[in-house]
Image (cartoon, helix red, strand yellow):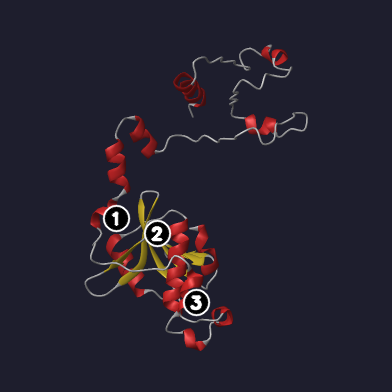
Amino acid sequence: MGKTYSILEFGRSCYENVAYFNFETNPKLNKTFEENISPDYHIAALGSLLGVAAGRAKFSFPVGKVDMKTMYPMDMEEFMLAMGEDALAEQIKKPLENYRDIDAFKIYVSDLGLLCAKNDLAANDVLYMVDELNDFKGGMTENYVNVQLTINGYKTYYWKSPRGAEIDFVIQRDGQLIPIEVKSADNTRAKSLQVYMDTYKPAYAIKISAKNFGFEDNKKTVPLYAAFCI
């Protein structure tokens, strides 16, 4: 992971003096640190089993005074940044941005409650999906999913073919372009989604509807209430 290197580099860059103690190679240091340490010092403790040790009953822990950080191996983006390839990293992150049509866009409302209020919809109408909502519930559901995706940090796009096939959302996730089809009920027939998959061969597709979780024909089914999990 590079934990030791990272913390020493942080100390070198941000402090005038750094004292480094290795309790693994020098176990006698345990006795030295049994006494209280002056609060004037900033302490950084690191180790693969540190979280396990801190959770044991025989250890006291200064609640509210410690920030816990979990370190993971470098991903490709971090490697490129470390190599000074910032521009390349940004370019790879924006394939959808590079191909978007600025003249083709949809407008969503960031607050679904305000959207319903603007259309004079009562809470019970939404809860019980009365027939009067048939012409509106598709757009309302799509708006709801857009809010959930945006909250999770996705920049949302949609796709439309020359022949009229349309995908509600296309997101970039883990370096893959993932199509998302949204249905307001449990009818999950999605011809446009199949057209997209046959044309572009995505790693998988996501269908959001009133149905429960599932996976079939390389399509992940996600219930509407769990859109925040994407």
The residue under label 1 is: 96
**Closest to the observer: 176 or 95?**
95
Q: Position of residue 192 (x, y in %)?
A: 33, 72
Q: Position of residue 147 (x, y in %)?
A: 45, 63
Q: Is residue 17 above or below residue 98?
A: above
Q: CA distance from mark 2 to mark 1?
A: 17 Å
Horizontal arrangement in the rendering, residue 125 relative to residue 81 (left or right)? right
The residue positioned 47% from the left and 55% from the top of the image is 152
**Mark 2 element type:** loop
Farthest residue, direction right: 58
The residue under label 3 is: 117
Horizontal arrangement in the rendering, residue 21 relative to residue 192 (left or right)? right
Residues tagged 1 and 3 counted as in contact (Cβ below 8 A): no
Label 1: few (<14), some or many (≥20) within 10 Å? some
Q: Is residue 144 above or below residue 59?
A: below
Q: CA distance from mark 1 to mark 3?
A: 33 Å
Q: Amino acid at mark 3?
A: Ala
Residue 184 visible in the shown view: no
- Count the marks: 3
The residue under label 2 is: 204
Q: Is residue 91 above or below residue 226?
A: above
The residue positioned 42% from the left and 71% from the top of the image is 142
The residue positioned 51% from the left and 22% from the top of the image is 4
Horizontal arrangement in the rendering, residue 2 relative to residue 91 (left or right)? right
Residue 42 visible in the shown view: yes
Of labels 2 and 1, earlier in sequence is 1
Q: Position of residue 119 (x, y in %)?
A: 46, 80
**Mark 3 element type:** helix
Q: Amino acid at mark 1?
A: Leu
**Closest to the observer: 198 or 178?**
178
Q: Amino acid at mark 2?
A: Tyr
